[in-house]
Amino acid sequence: MSSLTDFSMVVGLMEVELFIPEALSLKDKRSVVKSLKDQLRARFNIAVAEVEPSVKWQRATVGISTVGGDRRSVEGCLREVVQWIEGNRFVELIRVEHEVL
């Protein structure tokens, strides 16, 4: 049996602030954010949650985390997530902050 000292784990954390231009109500915003979270989970096998619920219909802040065996793969995953979000036609990326531990 191996101990935790034999195990290498890298954690990537990211917070993205989004603008949702077509949201005209809180219901519209929730629909877009839910769809985005579901697609990110399915495509990248990451954890995703809305972390700062905003009363503004066109703004959302989403937290993302991923775990891997090395820094390179975790950073690559976070980069791919950002690129995918940038290509999503329902949201615009306002801000990205990330950290790899």
Image (tube, grey):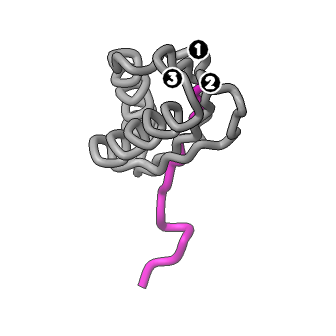
* Front-lying residue, 100 or 14: 14
Q: Is residue 14 above or below residue 90?
A: below
Q: Which mark is residue 65?
A: none
The residue under label 3 is: 23
Check disc 3 and report its element: helix, strand or loop: loop
The range drawn in magenta is 1-17
Dot 3, crowdedness within 10 Å: few (<14), some or many (≥20)? some
Image quadrant containing the N terminus: bottom left
Q: Residue at x 51, y 39 (%)?
A: 30
* Front-lying residue, 27 or 76: 27
Image quadrant containing the C terminus: top right
Does the magenta-highlighted stretch encompass residue 7? yes
* Front-lying residue, 3 or 41: 41
Check disc 1 and report its element: helix, strand or loop: strand
Q: Earlier in the sequence, mark 1 or mark 2?
A: 2
Q: Which label sits in the foreground, 3 or 2?
A: 3
Instruction: Confirm or deny contact between disc 1 and disc 2 (CB under 8 A).
Output: yes
Q: CA distance from mark 1 to mark 3?
A: 16 Å
Q: Position of residue 24 (x, y in %)?
A: 54, 22
Q: Earlier in the sequence, mark 1 or mark 3?
A: 3
The residue under label 1 is: 94
Please state which amino acid type lies under the numbered disc 3.
Ala
The residue under label 2 is: 59
Q: Is residue 21 above or below residue 82?
A: above
